[in-house]
Amino acid sequence: MNGLDKGPILVTGASGGIGGATVRQLIAEGAEVIANGRNKEALTALATETGCRTLAFDLESEDEVSAALGGLDLYGVVNCGGFGGEIATPMDTDISVFDKVMAINARGALLVTKYASQSMIRLGAGGAIVNVSSQASLVGLRGHISYGSSKAALDNITRVSALELGEHGIRVNSVNPTVVMTPMSAWYWGRPEVQGPFLDTMPLHRWATEDEIAAPIVFLLSDGAAMISGVSLPIDGGFTAV
Ligand SMILES: NC(=O)c1ccc[n+]([C@@H]2O[C@H](COP(=O)([O-])OP(=O)(O)OC[C@H]3O[C@@H](n4cnc5c(N)ncnc54)[C@H](OP(=O)(O)O)[C@@H]3O)[C@@H](O)[C@H]2O)c1
């Protein structure tokens, strides 16, 4: 048994590229999946394709998160919903964009963790949470003052949650992907002058695919990762190792 059949798994950001791939792989492994985003059309299309359930809410609203998750039985969570924000330096950042990036990527994931973990503890059957962070939390990347800060906050949410929830048999981990050519990143990282020098320094010299991020997420939710908690796992072609 891969352990993915222990109860429903909520995937935020399921209407997007990496979240959608994660839903498809989880369903293929026999999991029951609840797909979240704000775009109801995209969620309905995913449900028609995969048989997942859908649950739309805005990660920026504690009222919406608590209403959606209160009393919902969950075994797992993938905090994949996210916002790229701006490419800016500490000298020219638009602080309202910084606030929004933090509100979705860090505060939103913490709100989901707050209400989901209450339900996991109530059920008493353990659980697993995977936070979709970024390589941008592990090293300083030019232009990434807001986004990198939000993902560094998310990595700390991972560590402290792993500490606090471990006694309830709930594991909490991050994955830290390099660039995947979804709409969030393609407009910037697809530029030859940005892409070329970056890929030159990365051992594998190519961007990741959605499925290459989804597979380690599925592994971290499964019983194969039963002794793994509190890690930030780079999925970055070796970029942060050299
Ligand atoms: N693409 C990359 O290069 C890359 C690299 C490293 C990490 N990541 C991380 O991977 C995750 C998924 O990114 P992606 O590339 O798949 O991007 P994407 O295709 O743009 O998807 C973003 C997802 O986040 C959801 N979302 C955004 N704001 C939300 C809000 N306020 N409330 C609820 N949902 C919200 C979107 O839902 P709606 O559109 O339905 O609102 C969508 O499902 C993000 O956390 C991102 O930071 C991406």
Image (cartoon, rainbow, N blue to C red):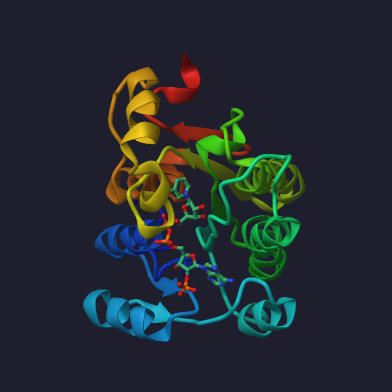
In front: 152, or 142?
142
Residue 140 in the figure: left or right of residue 81: right
Lateral position of residue 37 relative to residue 105, left or right: left
Which residue is situated farthest in the top direction here? 242
Q: Residue at x 56, y 47 (%)?
A: 87
- On the image, the x and y values in percent for residue 153 come to 71, 45
Instruction: Determine if residue 4 is in view.
Output: yes
Instruction: Name above or below for residue 92 compared with residue 142.
Output: below
Q: Looking at the image, which residue is at 66% across and 82% down?
A: 64
Hey, which quadrant is residue 236 in on the image? Answer: top left
x%, y% of residue 113? 67, 61
Q: Residue at 67% across / 72% down in the picture? A: 60
Percent coordinates x, y for residue 111 in the rendering: 70, 66
Q: Nearer the viewer, residue 214 or 125?
A: 214
Q: Note whether residue 227 is visible.
A: no
Residue drawn at point x = 25 percent, y = 83 percent? 48
Number of labels in the image equals 0
Vertical placement of residue 68 versus 191, above or below:
below
Residue 67 pos. (x, y %): 67, 85
Task: Return the residue nearer the eye: 227 or 174.
Answer: 174
Q: Nearer the viewer, residue 90 or 109?
A: 90
Q: Is residue 226 left or right of residue 196?
A: right
Using the image, determine if residue 64 lies above or below residue 220.
below
